[in-house]
Structures are given as C-alpha cells and as structure tokens.
Amino acid sequence: MPRGDKSSYTDKQKRQAEHIEEGYEKRGLSEGEAERRAWATVNKMTGGGKKSGSGVGKPVNKEPAKKGGRKGGAASKARPASARSAAAKKAAATRKRNAAAGGGQGAAAKKAAPKSAGSSARKSAGSSARKSAGSSARKSAGSSARKSAGSSARKSAGSSARKSAGSSARKSAGSSTRKGAGSSARKSSASRKTTSRRTGTGARRAASGS
C-alpha cells in the first residue's frame, strides 16, 4: 500500500481525523502539521485502519484524546490573566456582532409572525362569519320562500275550492230550479188539458141528451 493511502480506514476514522485536524488548525497550526497530528492521533487510538489494516479487531484506546485534552487545558490555564481576558473580550465582541447581524432578521421574523398569525386569524374569522351569514341567509330565505309558497298554495287552493263549490252550488241550484219549473209547467199543462177534455166531453154529453 503506498504511503498516505487511506483506503484501509473506515469512514468513521476519516471523520475523526478531520475533526481533530480542524481543532489543530483553530489553534494556529499549519494545515500539514494539523493533518499529521490528526492521523497520528487516530492511529494511536484505533491501532490503524479498521477496514483492512492493522487496526482490525483491536479495541479503541481513548487515552490519546484525553491526553490532548489535559495538555490543552493545562496550556490554557498557564496563560496569563491578560491573555484570557483579551480572548474573553474578543469572544464577547464576536457574539455581540453575530447577534446584531442575525438579530435584525430575528426581530423581523418575530414581528412578521404575529402579523401573519393575526392576519390568518382575521381572515379565517371573516371567512367563517361570511360562511355562517350566507348559510343563515340561505336558510332563512329558503324557509321564507317555503312558507310563502305554502301560504300561497293554501290560499289559492282555498279560493279555488270555494269558487268551484260556489259554481257547483249555483249550477245545481239552477238545474234544480229549471227542472222544478219544467215539471210544474208540464203538470199544469197536463191538468189544463185534462180539464178541457172533461169539459168538452160534458158539453157533448149534454148536447146529445137534449
């Protein structure tokens, strides 16, 4: 395997080396030195490549990482108070600058959120009110229409019934009157005919007897 080949290392080992290298670079080391120390630390912890290298089957040793933490902590502690204070002030200024840069957007987002929420609430309330009002109006209109239609139908039906009843009554009364008058006229005519017949017969008998 050529020197520097990392094909026998797992993805996890590569990620560990990248994180360690970034940490060294933040401390001020050059890129090459940071990479060298990072892979040395990974090899010390894992024993080599765990995919097909010398680290297969070996347990992970976390002592090198702990040693680095102790050394880093001791170095930080050994710094003078002025250096620590300067670093703290620099960090505070950075936090303040980042907050100011992102604070405007955050404030705008916060302001927009209640507005949008209120607008949505008003819109939904207005829509619900309009829907309910329209539904009530349609219901009342339908009820009124049905009532008026039923009342009109009942009135027209009653009027038609009364008219037809009156017409039938008049028709039947007229028919009965005409029938009664005709029958009386016929009866009186027949009576007159009978009387005249009887009178003529009596006169003839009297003439023949004399």
Image (cartoon, rainbow, N blue to C red):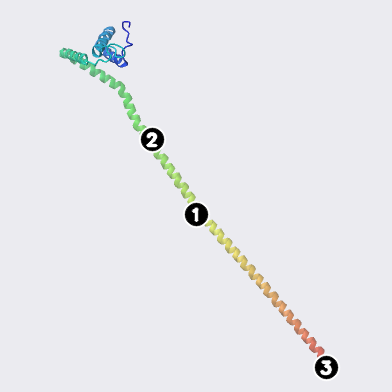
Q: Quadrant of the C terminus?
A: bottom right
Residue 63 appears at what percent x and percent y?
A: 20, 15
Amino acid type of the residue tagged 3 in the rendering: Gly
Against 78, is 189 above or below?
Answer: below
Q: Nearer the viewer, mark 2 or mark 3?
A: 3
Measured in 3D between alpha carbons, the distance from the residue under mark 1 to the one under mark 2, in whole angstroms, is 40 Å
Crowding at dot 1, Cα within 10 Å, few <14 / some 14-19 / many 20+, comes out as few
Residue 54 appears at what percent x and percent y?
A: 27, 11
Amino acid type of the residue tagged 2 in the rendering: Ser
Residue 183 appears at what percent x and percent y?
A: 70, 76
- Quarter of the image where one finds residue 19: top left
Which residue reaches farthest top? 3
- Quarter of the image where one finds residue 3: top left
Question: Which residue does the image show at 66% across and 70% down from the upper left?
Answer: 175
* Mark before the other along the chain sequence, 2 or 3: 2
Q: Secondary structure at mark 3?
A: helix
Q: Which residue is mark 2?
A: 120
Crowding at dot 3, Cα within 10 Å, few <14 / some 14-19 / many 20+, comes out as few
Q: Which residue is mark 1?
A: 147
Measured in 3D between alpha carbons, the distance from the residue under mark 2 to the one under mark 3, in whole angstroms, is 130 Å
Against 133, is 192 above or below?
Answer: below
Q: Which residue is mark 3?
A: 209
